[in-house]
């Protein structure tokens, strides 16, 4: 059996993507142009039921501009999880609004509806749940809370291309939804983001904000940013869009193999999937008993040449950049998850032998430590 390193993630870039880039370079139209427009339409049709969709140069930019486009700003509060990448809280703070960090529920690592309800104040403008690791948030319960209190929902779908809840696609639930196209996501454009919008007005605001505040050259309507996607990146994304469904199916198949191989292993809790949810396994995240996680991660790398990742070791409310928004905050489920989670390789490039190695390595390390 090969002992080559099994990476925790592996972008897949092939000849079709290279040919698409060459086509754009030959055209001479390199900045935002027809490839971007086509990618927006195709992505919206594929992942968001035809919702208007706006391409930007990163997922974080999409999240930030989405909030601005829906009117979030100084004086507002937006409820967010602390157990996620910092871009979620950052995007709120960058608008001048206040990120309000709340705890997660333990099964799917998404916003705890009871914690959301308890955090609502007269200043609350909306809720930004994260479809973490590729599993949708508890849509029915969060929507009920939003309706009761007249709040908006802003989806962080950075990791959830193709996920769904009760037959509803992620990306069709909130006022807007941000998808990341970073290289390690389930599909990539090299770098970039997509924002699906509930209506044309939000989409137009986004287009203004991404392009210096103008739709027509030199007719600046608002103070905007330069957050455009290039045609080079869009060309890569268009090719990847034709492949992502097959890659997702392979991720799901790999997760089944990992679930079966790790079932009953003492000290390991495999990922759970809610009834009616479709998990796309951006990450395959297990829980490991407290005190064992870091030993397992190190031993997987050192002794078995298997990569893994901890997403996320420091909750947002304890980061130096965001702690000022959460003085004295206690989020027990978030803290517990940060100590216990470990993401094993699940990407579509894994072979059957790779999966066997991953399972065998986890079992061997944990048994050796017991």
Image: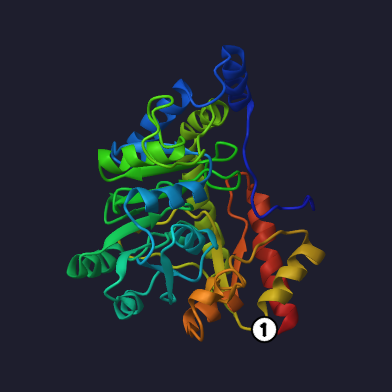
Q: In the image, is 366 to the left or to the right of 84?
A: right
56, 43: nearer the viewer? 56
Can the viewer see residue 187?
A: yes
Can the viewer see residue 265?
A: no
The x and y percentages for residue 48 are: 32, 42
**Colour scheme of the picture:** rainbow
The x and y percentages for residue 170 are: 35, 51
162, 197: nearer the viewer? 197
Q: Crowdedness of circle 1 by 10 Å Cα count: few (<14), some, many (20+)?
A: few
Q: In the image, is 246 to the left or to the right of 17?
A: left
Give the residue at x 37% y 75%.
112
Image-quadrant location for residue 318: bottom right
Q: Is residue 154 above or below residue 233?
A: below
Q: In the image, is 23 to the left or to the right of 3?
A: left
Which residue has dot 1 on it?
291
Mark 1 falls on what kind of element?
Answer: loop
């Amino acid at each position: 059996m090969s002992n080559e390193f099994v990476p925790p993630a592996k972008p897949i870039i092939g000849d079709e993507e290279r040919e698409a880039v060459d086509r754009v370079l030959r055209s001479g139209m390199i900045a935002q142009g027809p490839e971007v427009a086509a990618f927006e339409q195709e992505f919206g049709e594929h992942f968001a039921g035809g919702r208007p969709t706006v391409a930007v140069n990163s997922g974080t930019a999409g999240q930030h501009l989405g909030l601005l486009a829906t009117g979030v700003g100084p004086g507002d509060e937006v409820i967010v999880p602390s157990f996620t990448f910092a871009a979620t809280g950052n995007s709120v703070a960058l608008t001048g609004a206040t990120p309000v960090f709340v705890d997660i529920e333990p099964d799917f690592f998404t916003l705890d509806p009871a914690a959301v309800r308890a955090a609502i104040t007269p200043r609350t403008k909306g809720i930004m749940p994260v479809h973490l690791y590729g599993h949708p948030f508890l849509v029915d319960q969060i929507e009920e809370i939003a309706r009761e209190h007249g709040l908006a929902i802003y989806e962080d779908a950075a990791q959830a291309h193709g996920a769904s809840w009760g037959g509803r696609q992620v990306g069709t639930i909130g006022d807007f939804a941000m998808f990341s196209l970073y290289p390690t996501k389930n599909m990539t454009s090299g770098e970039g983001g997509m924002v699906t919008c509930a209506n044309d007005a939000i989409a137009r605001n986004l287009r203004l904000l991404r392009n210096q505040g103008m739709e027509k050259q030199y007719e600046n309507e608002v103070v905007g940013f330069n957050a455009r996607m290039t045609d080079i990146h869009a060309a890569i994304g268009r090719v990847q869009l034709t492949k992502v469904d097959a890659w997702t199916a392979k991720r799901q198949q790999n997760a089944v193999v990992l679930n079966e191989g790790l079932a009953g292993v003492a000290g390991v809790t495999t990922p759970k999937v809610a009834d009616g949810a479709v998990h796309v396994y951006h990450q395959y995240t297990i829980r490991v008993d407290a005190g064992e996680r870091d030993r397992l991660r190190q031993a997987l790398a050192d002794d078995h040449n298997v990569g893994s990742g901890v997403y996320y070791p420091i909750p947002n409310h304890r980061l130096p950049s965001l702690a000022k928004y959460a003085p004295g905050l206690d989020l027990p489920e978030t803290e517990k998850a940060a100590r216990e989670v470990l993401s094993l390789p699940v990407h579509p490039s894994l072979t059957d032998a790779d999966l066997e190695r991953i399972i065998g390595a986890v079992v061997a390390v944990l048994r050796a430590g017991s």
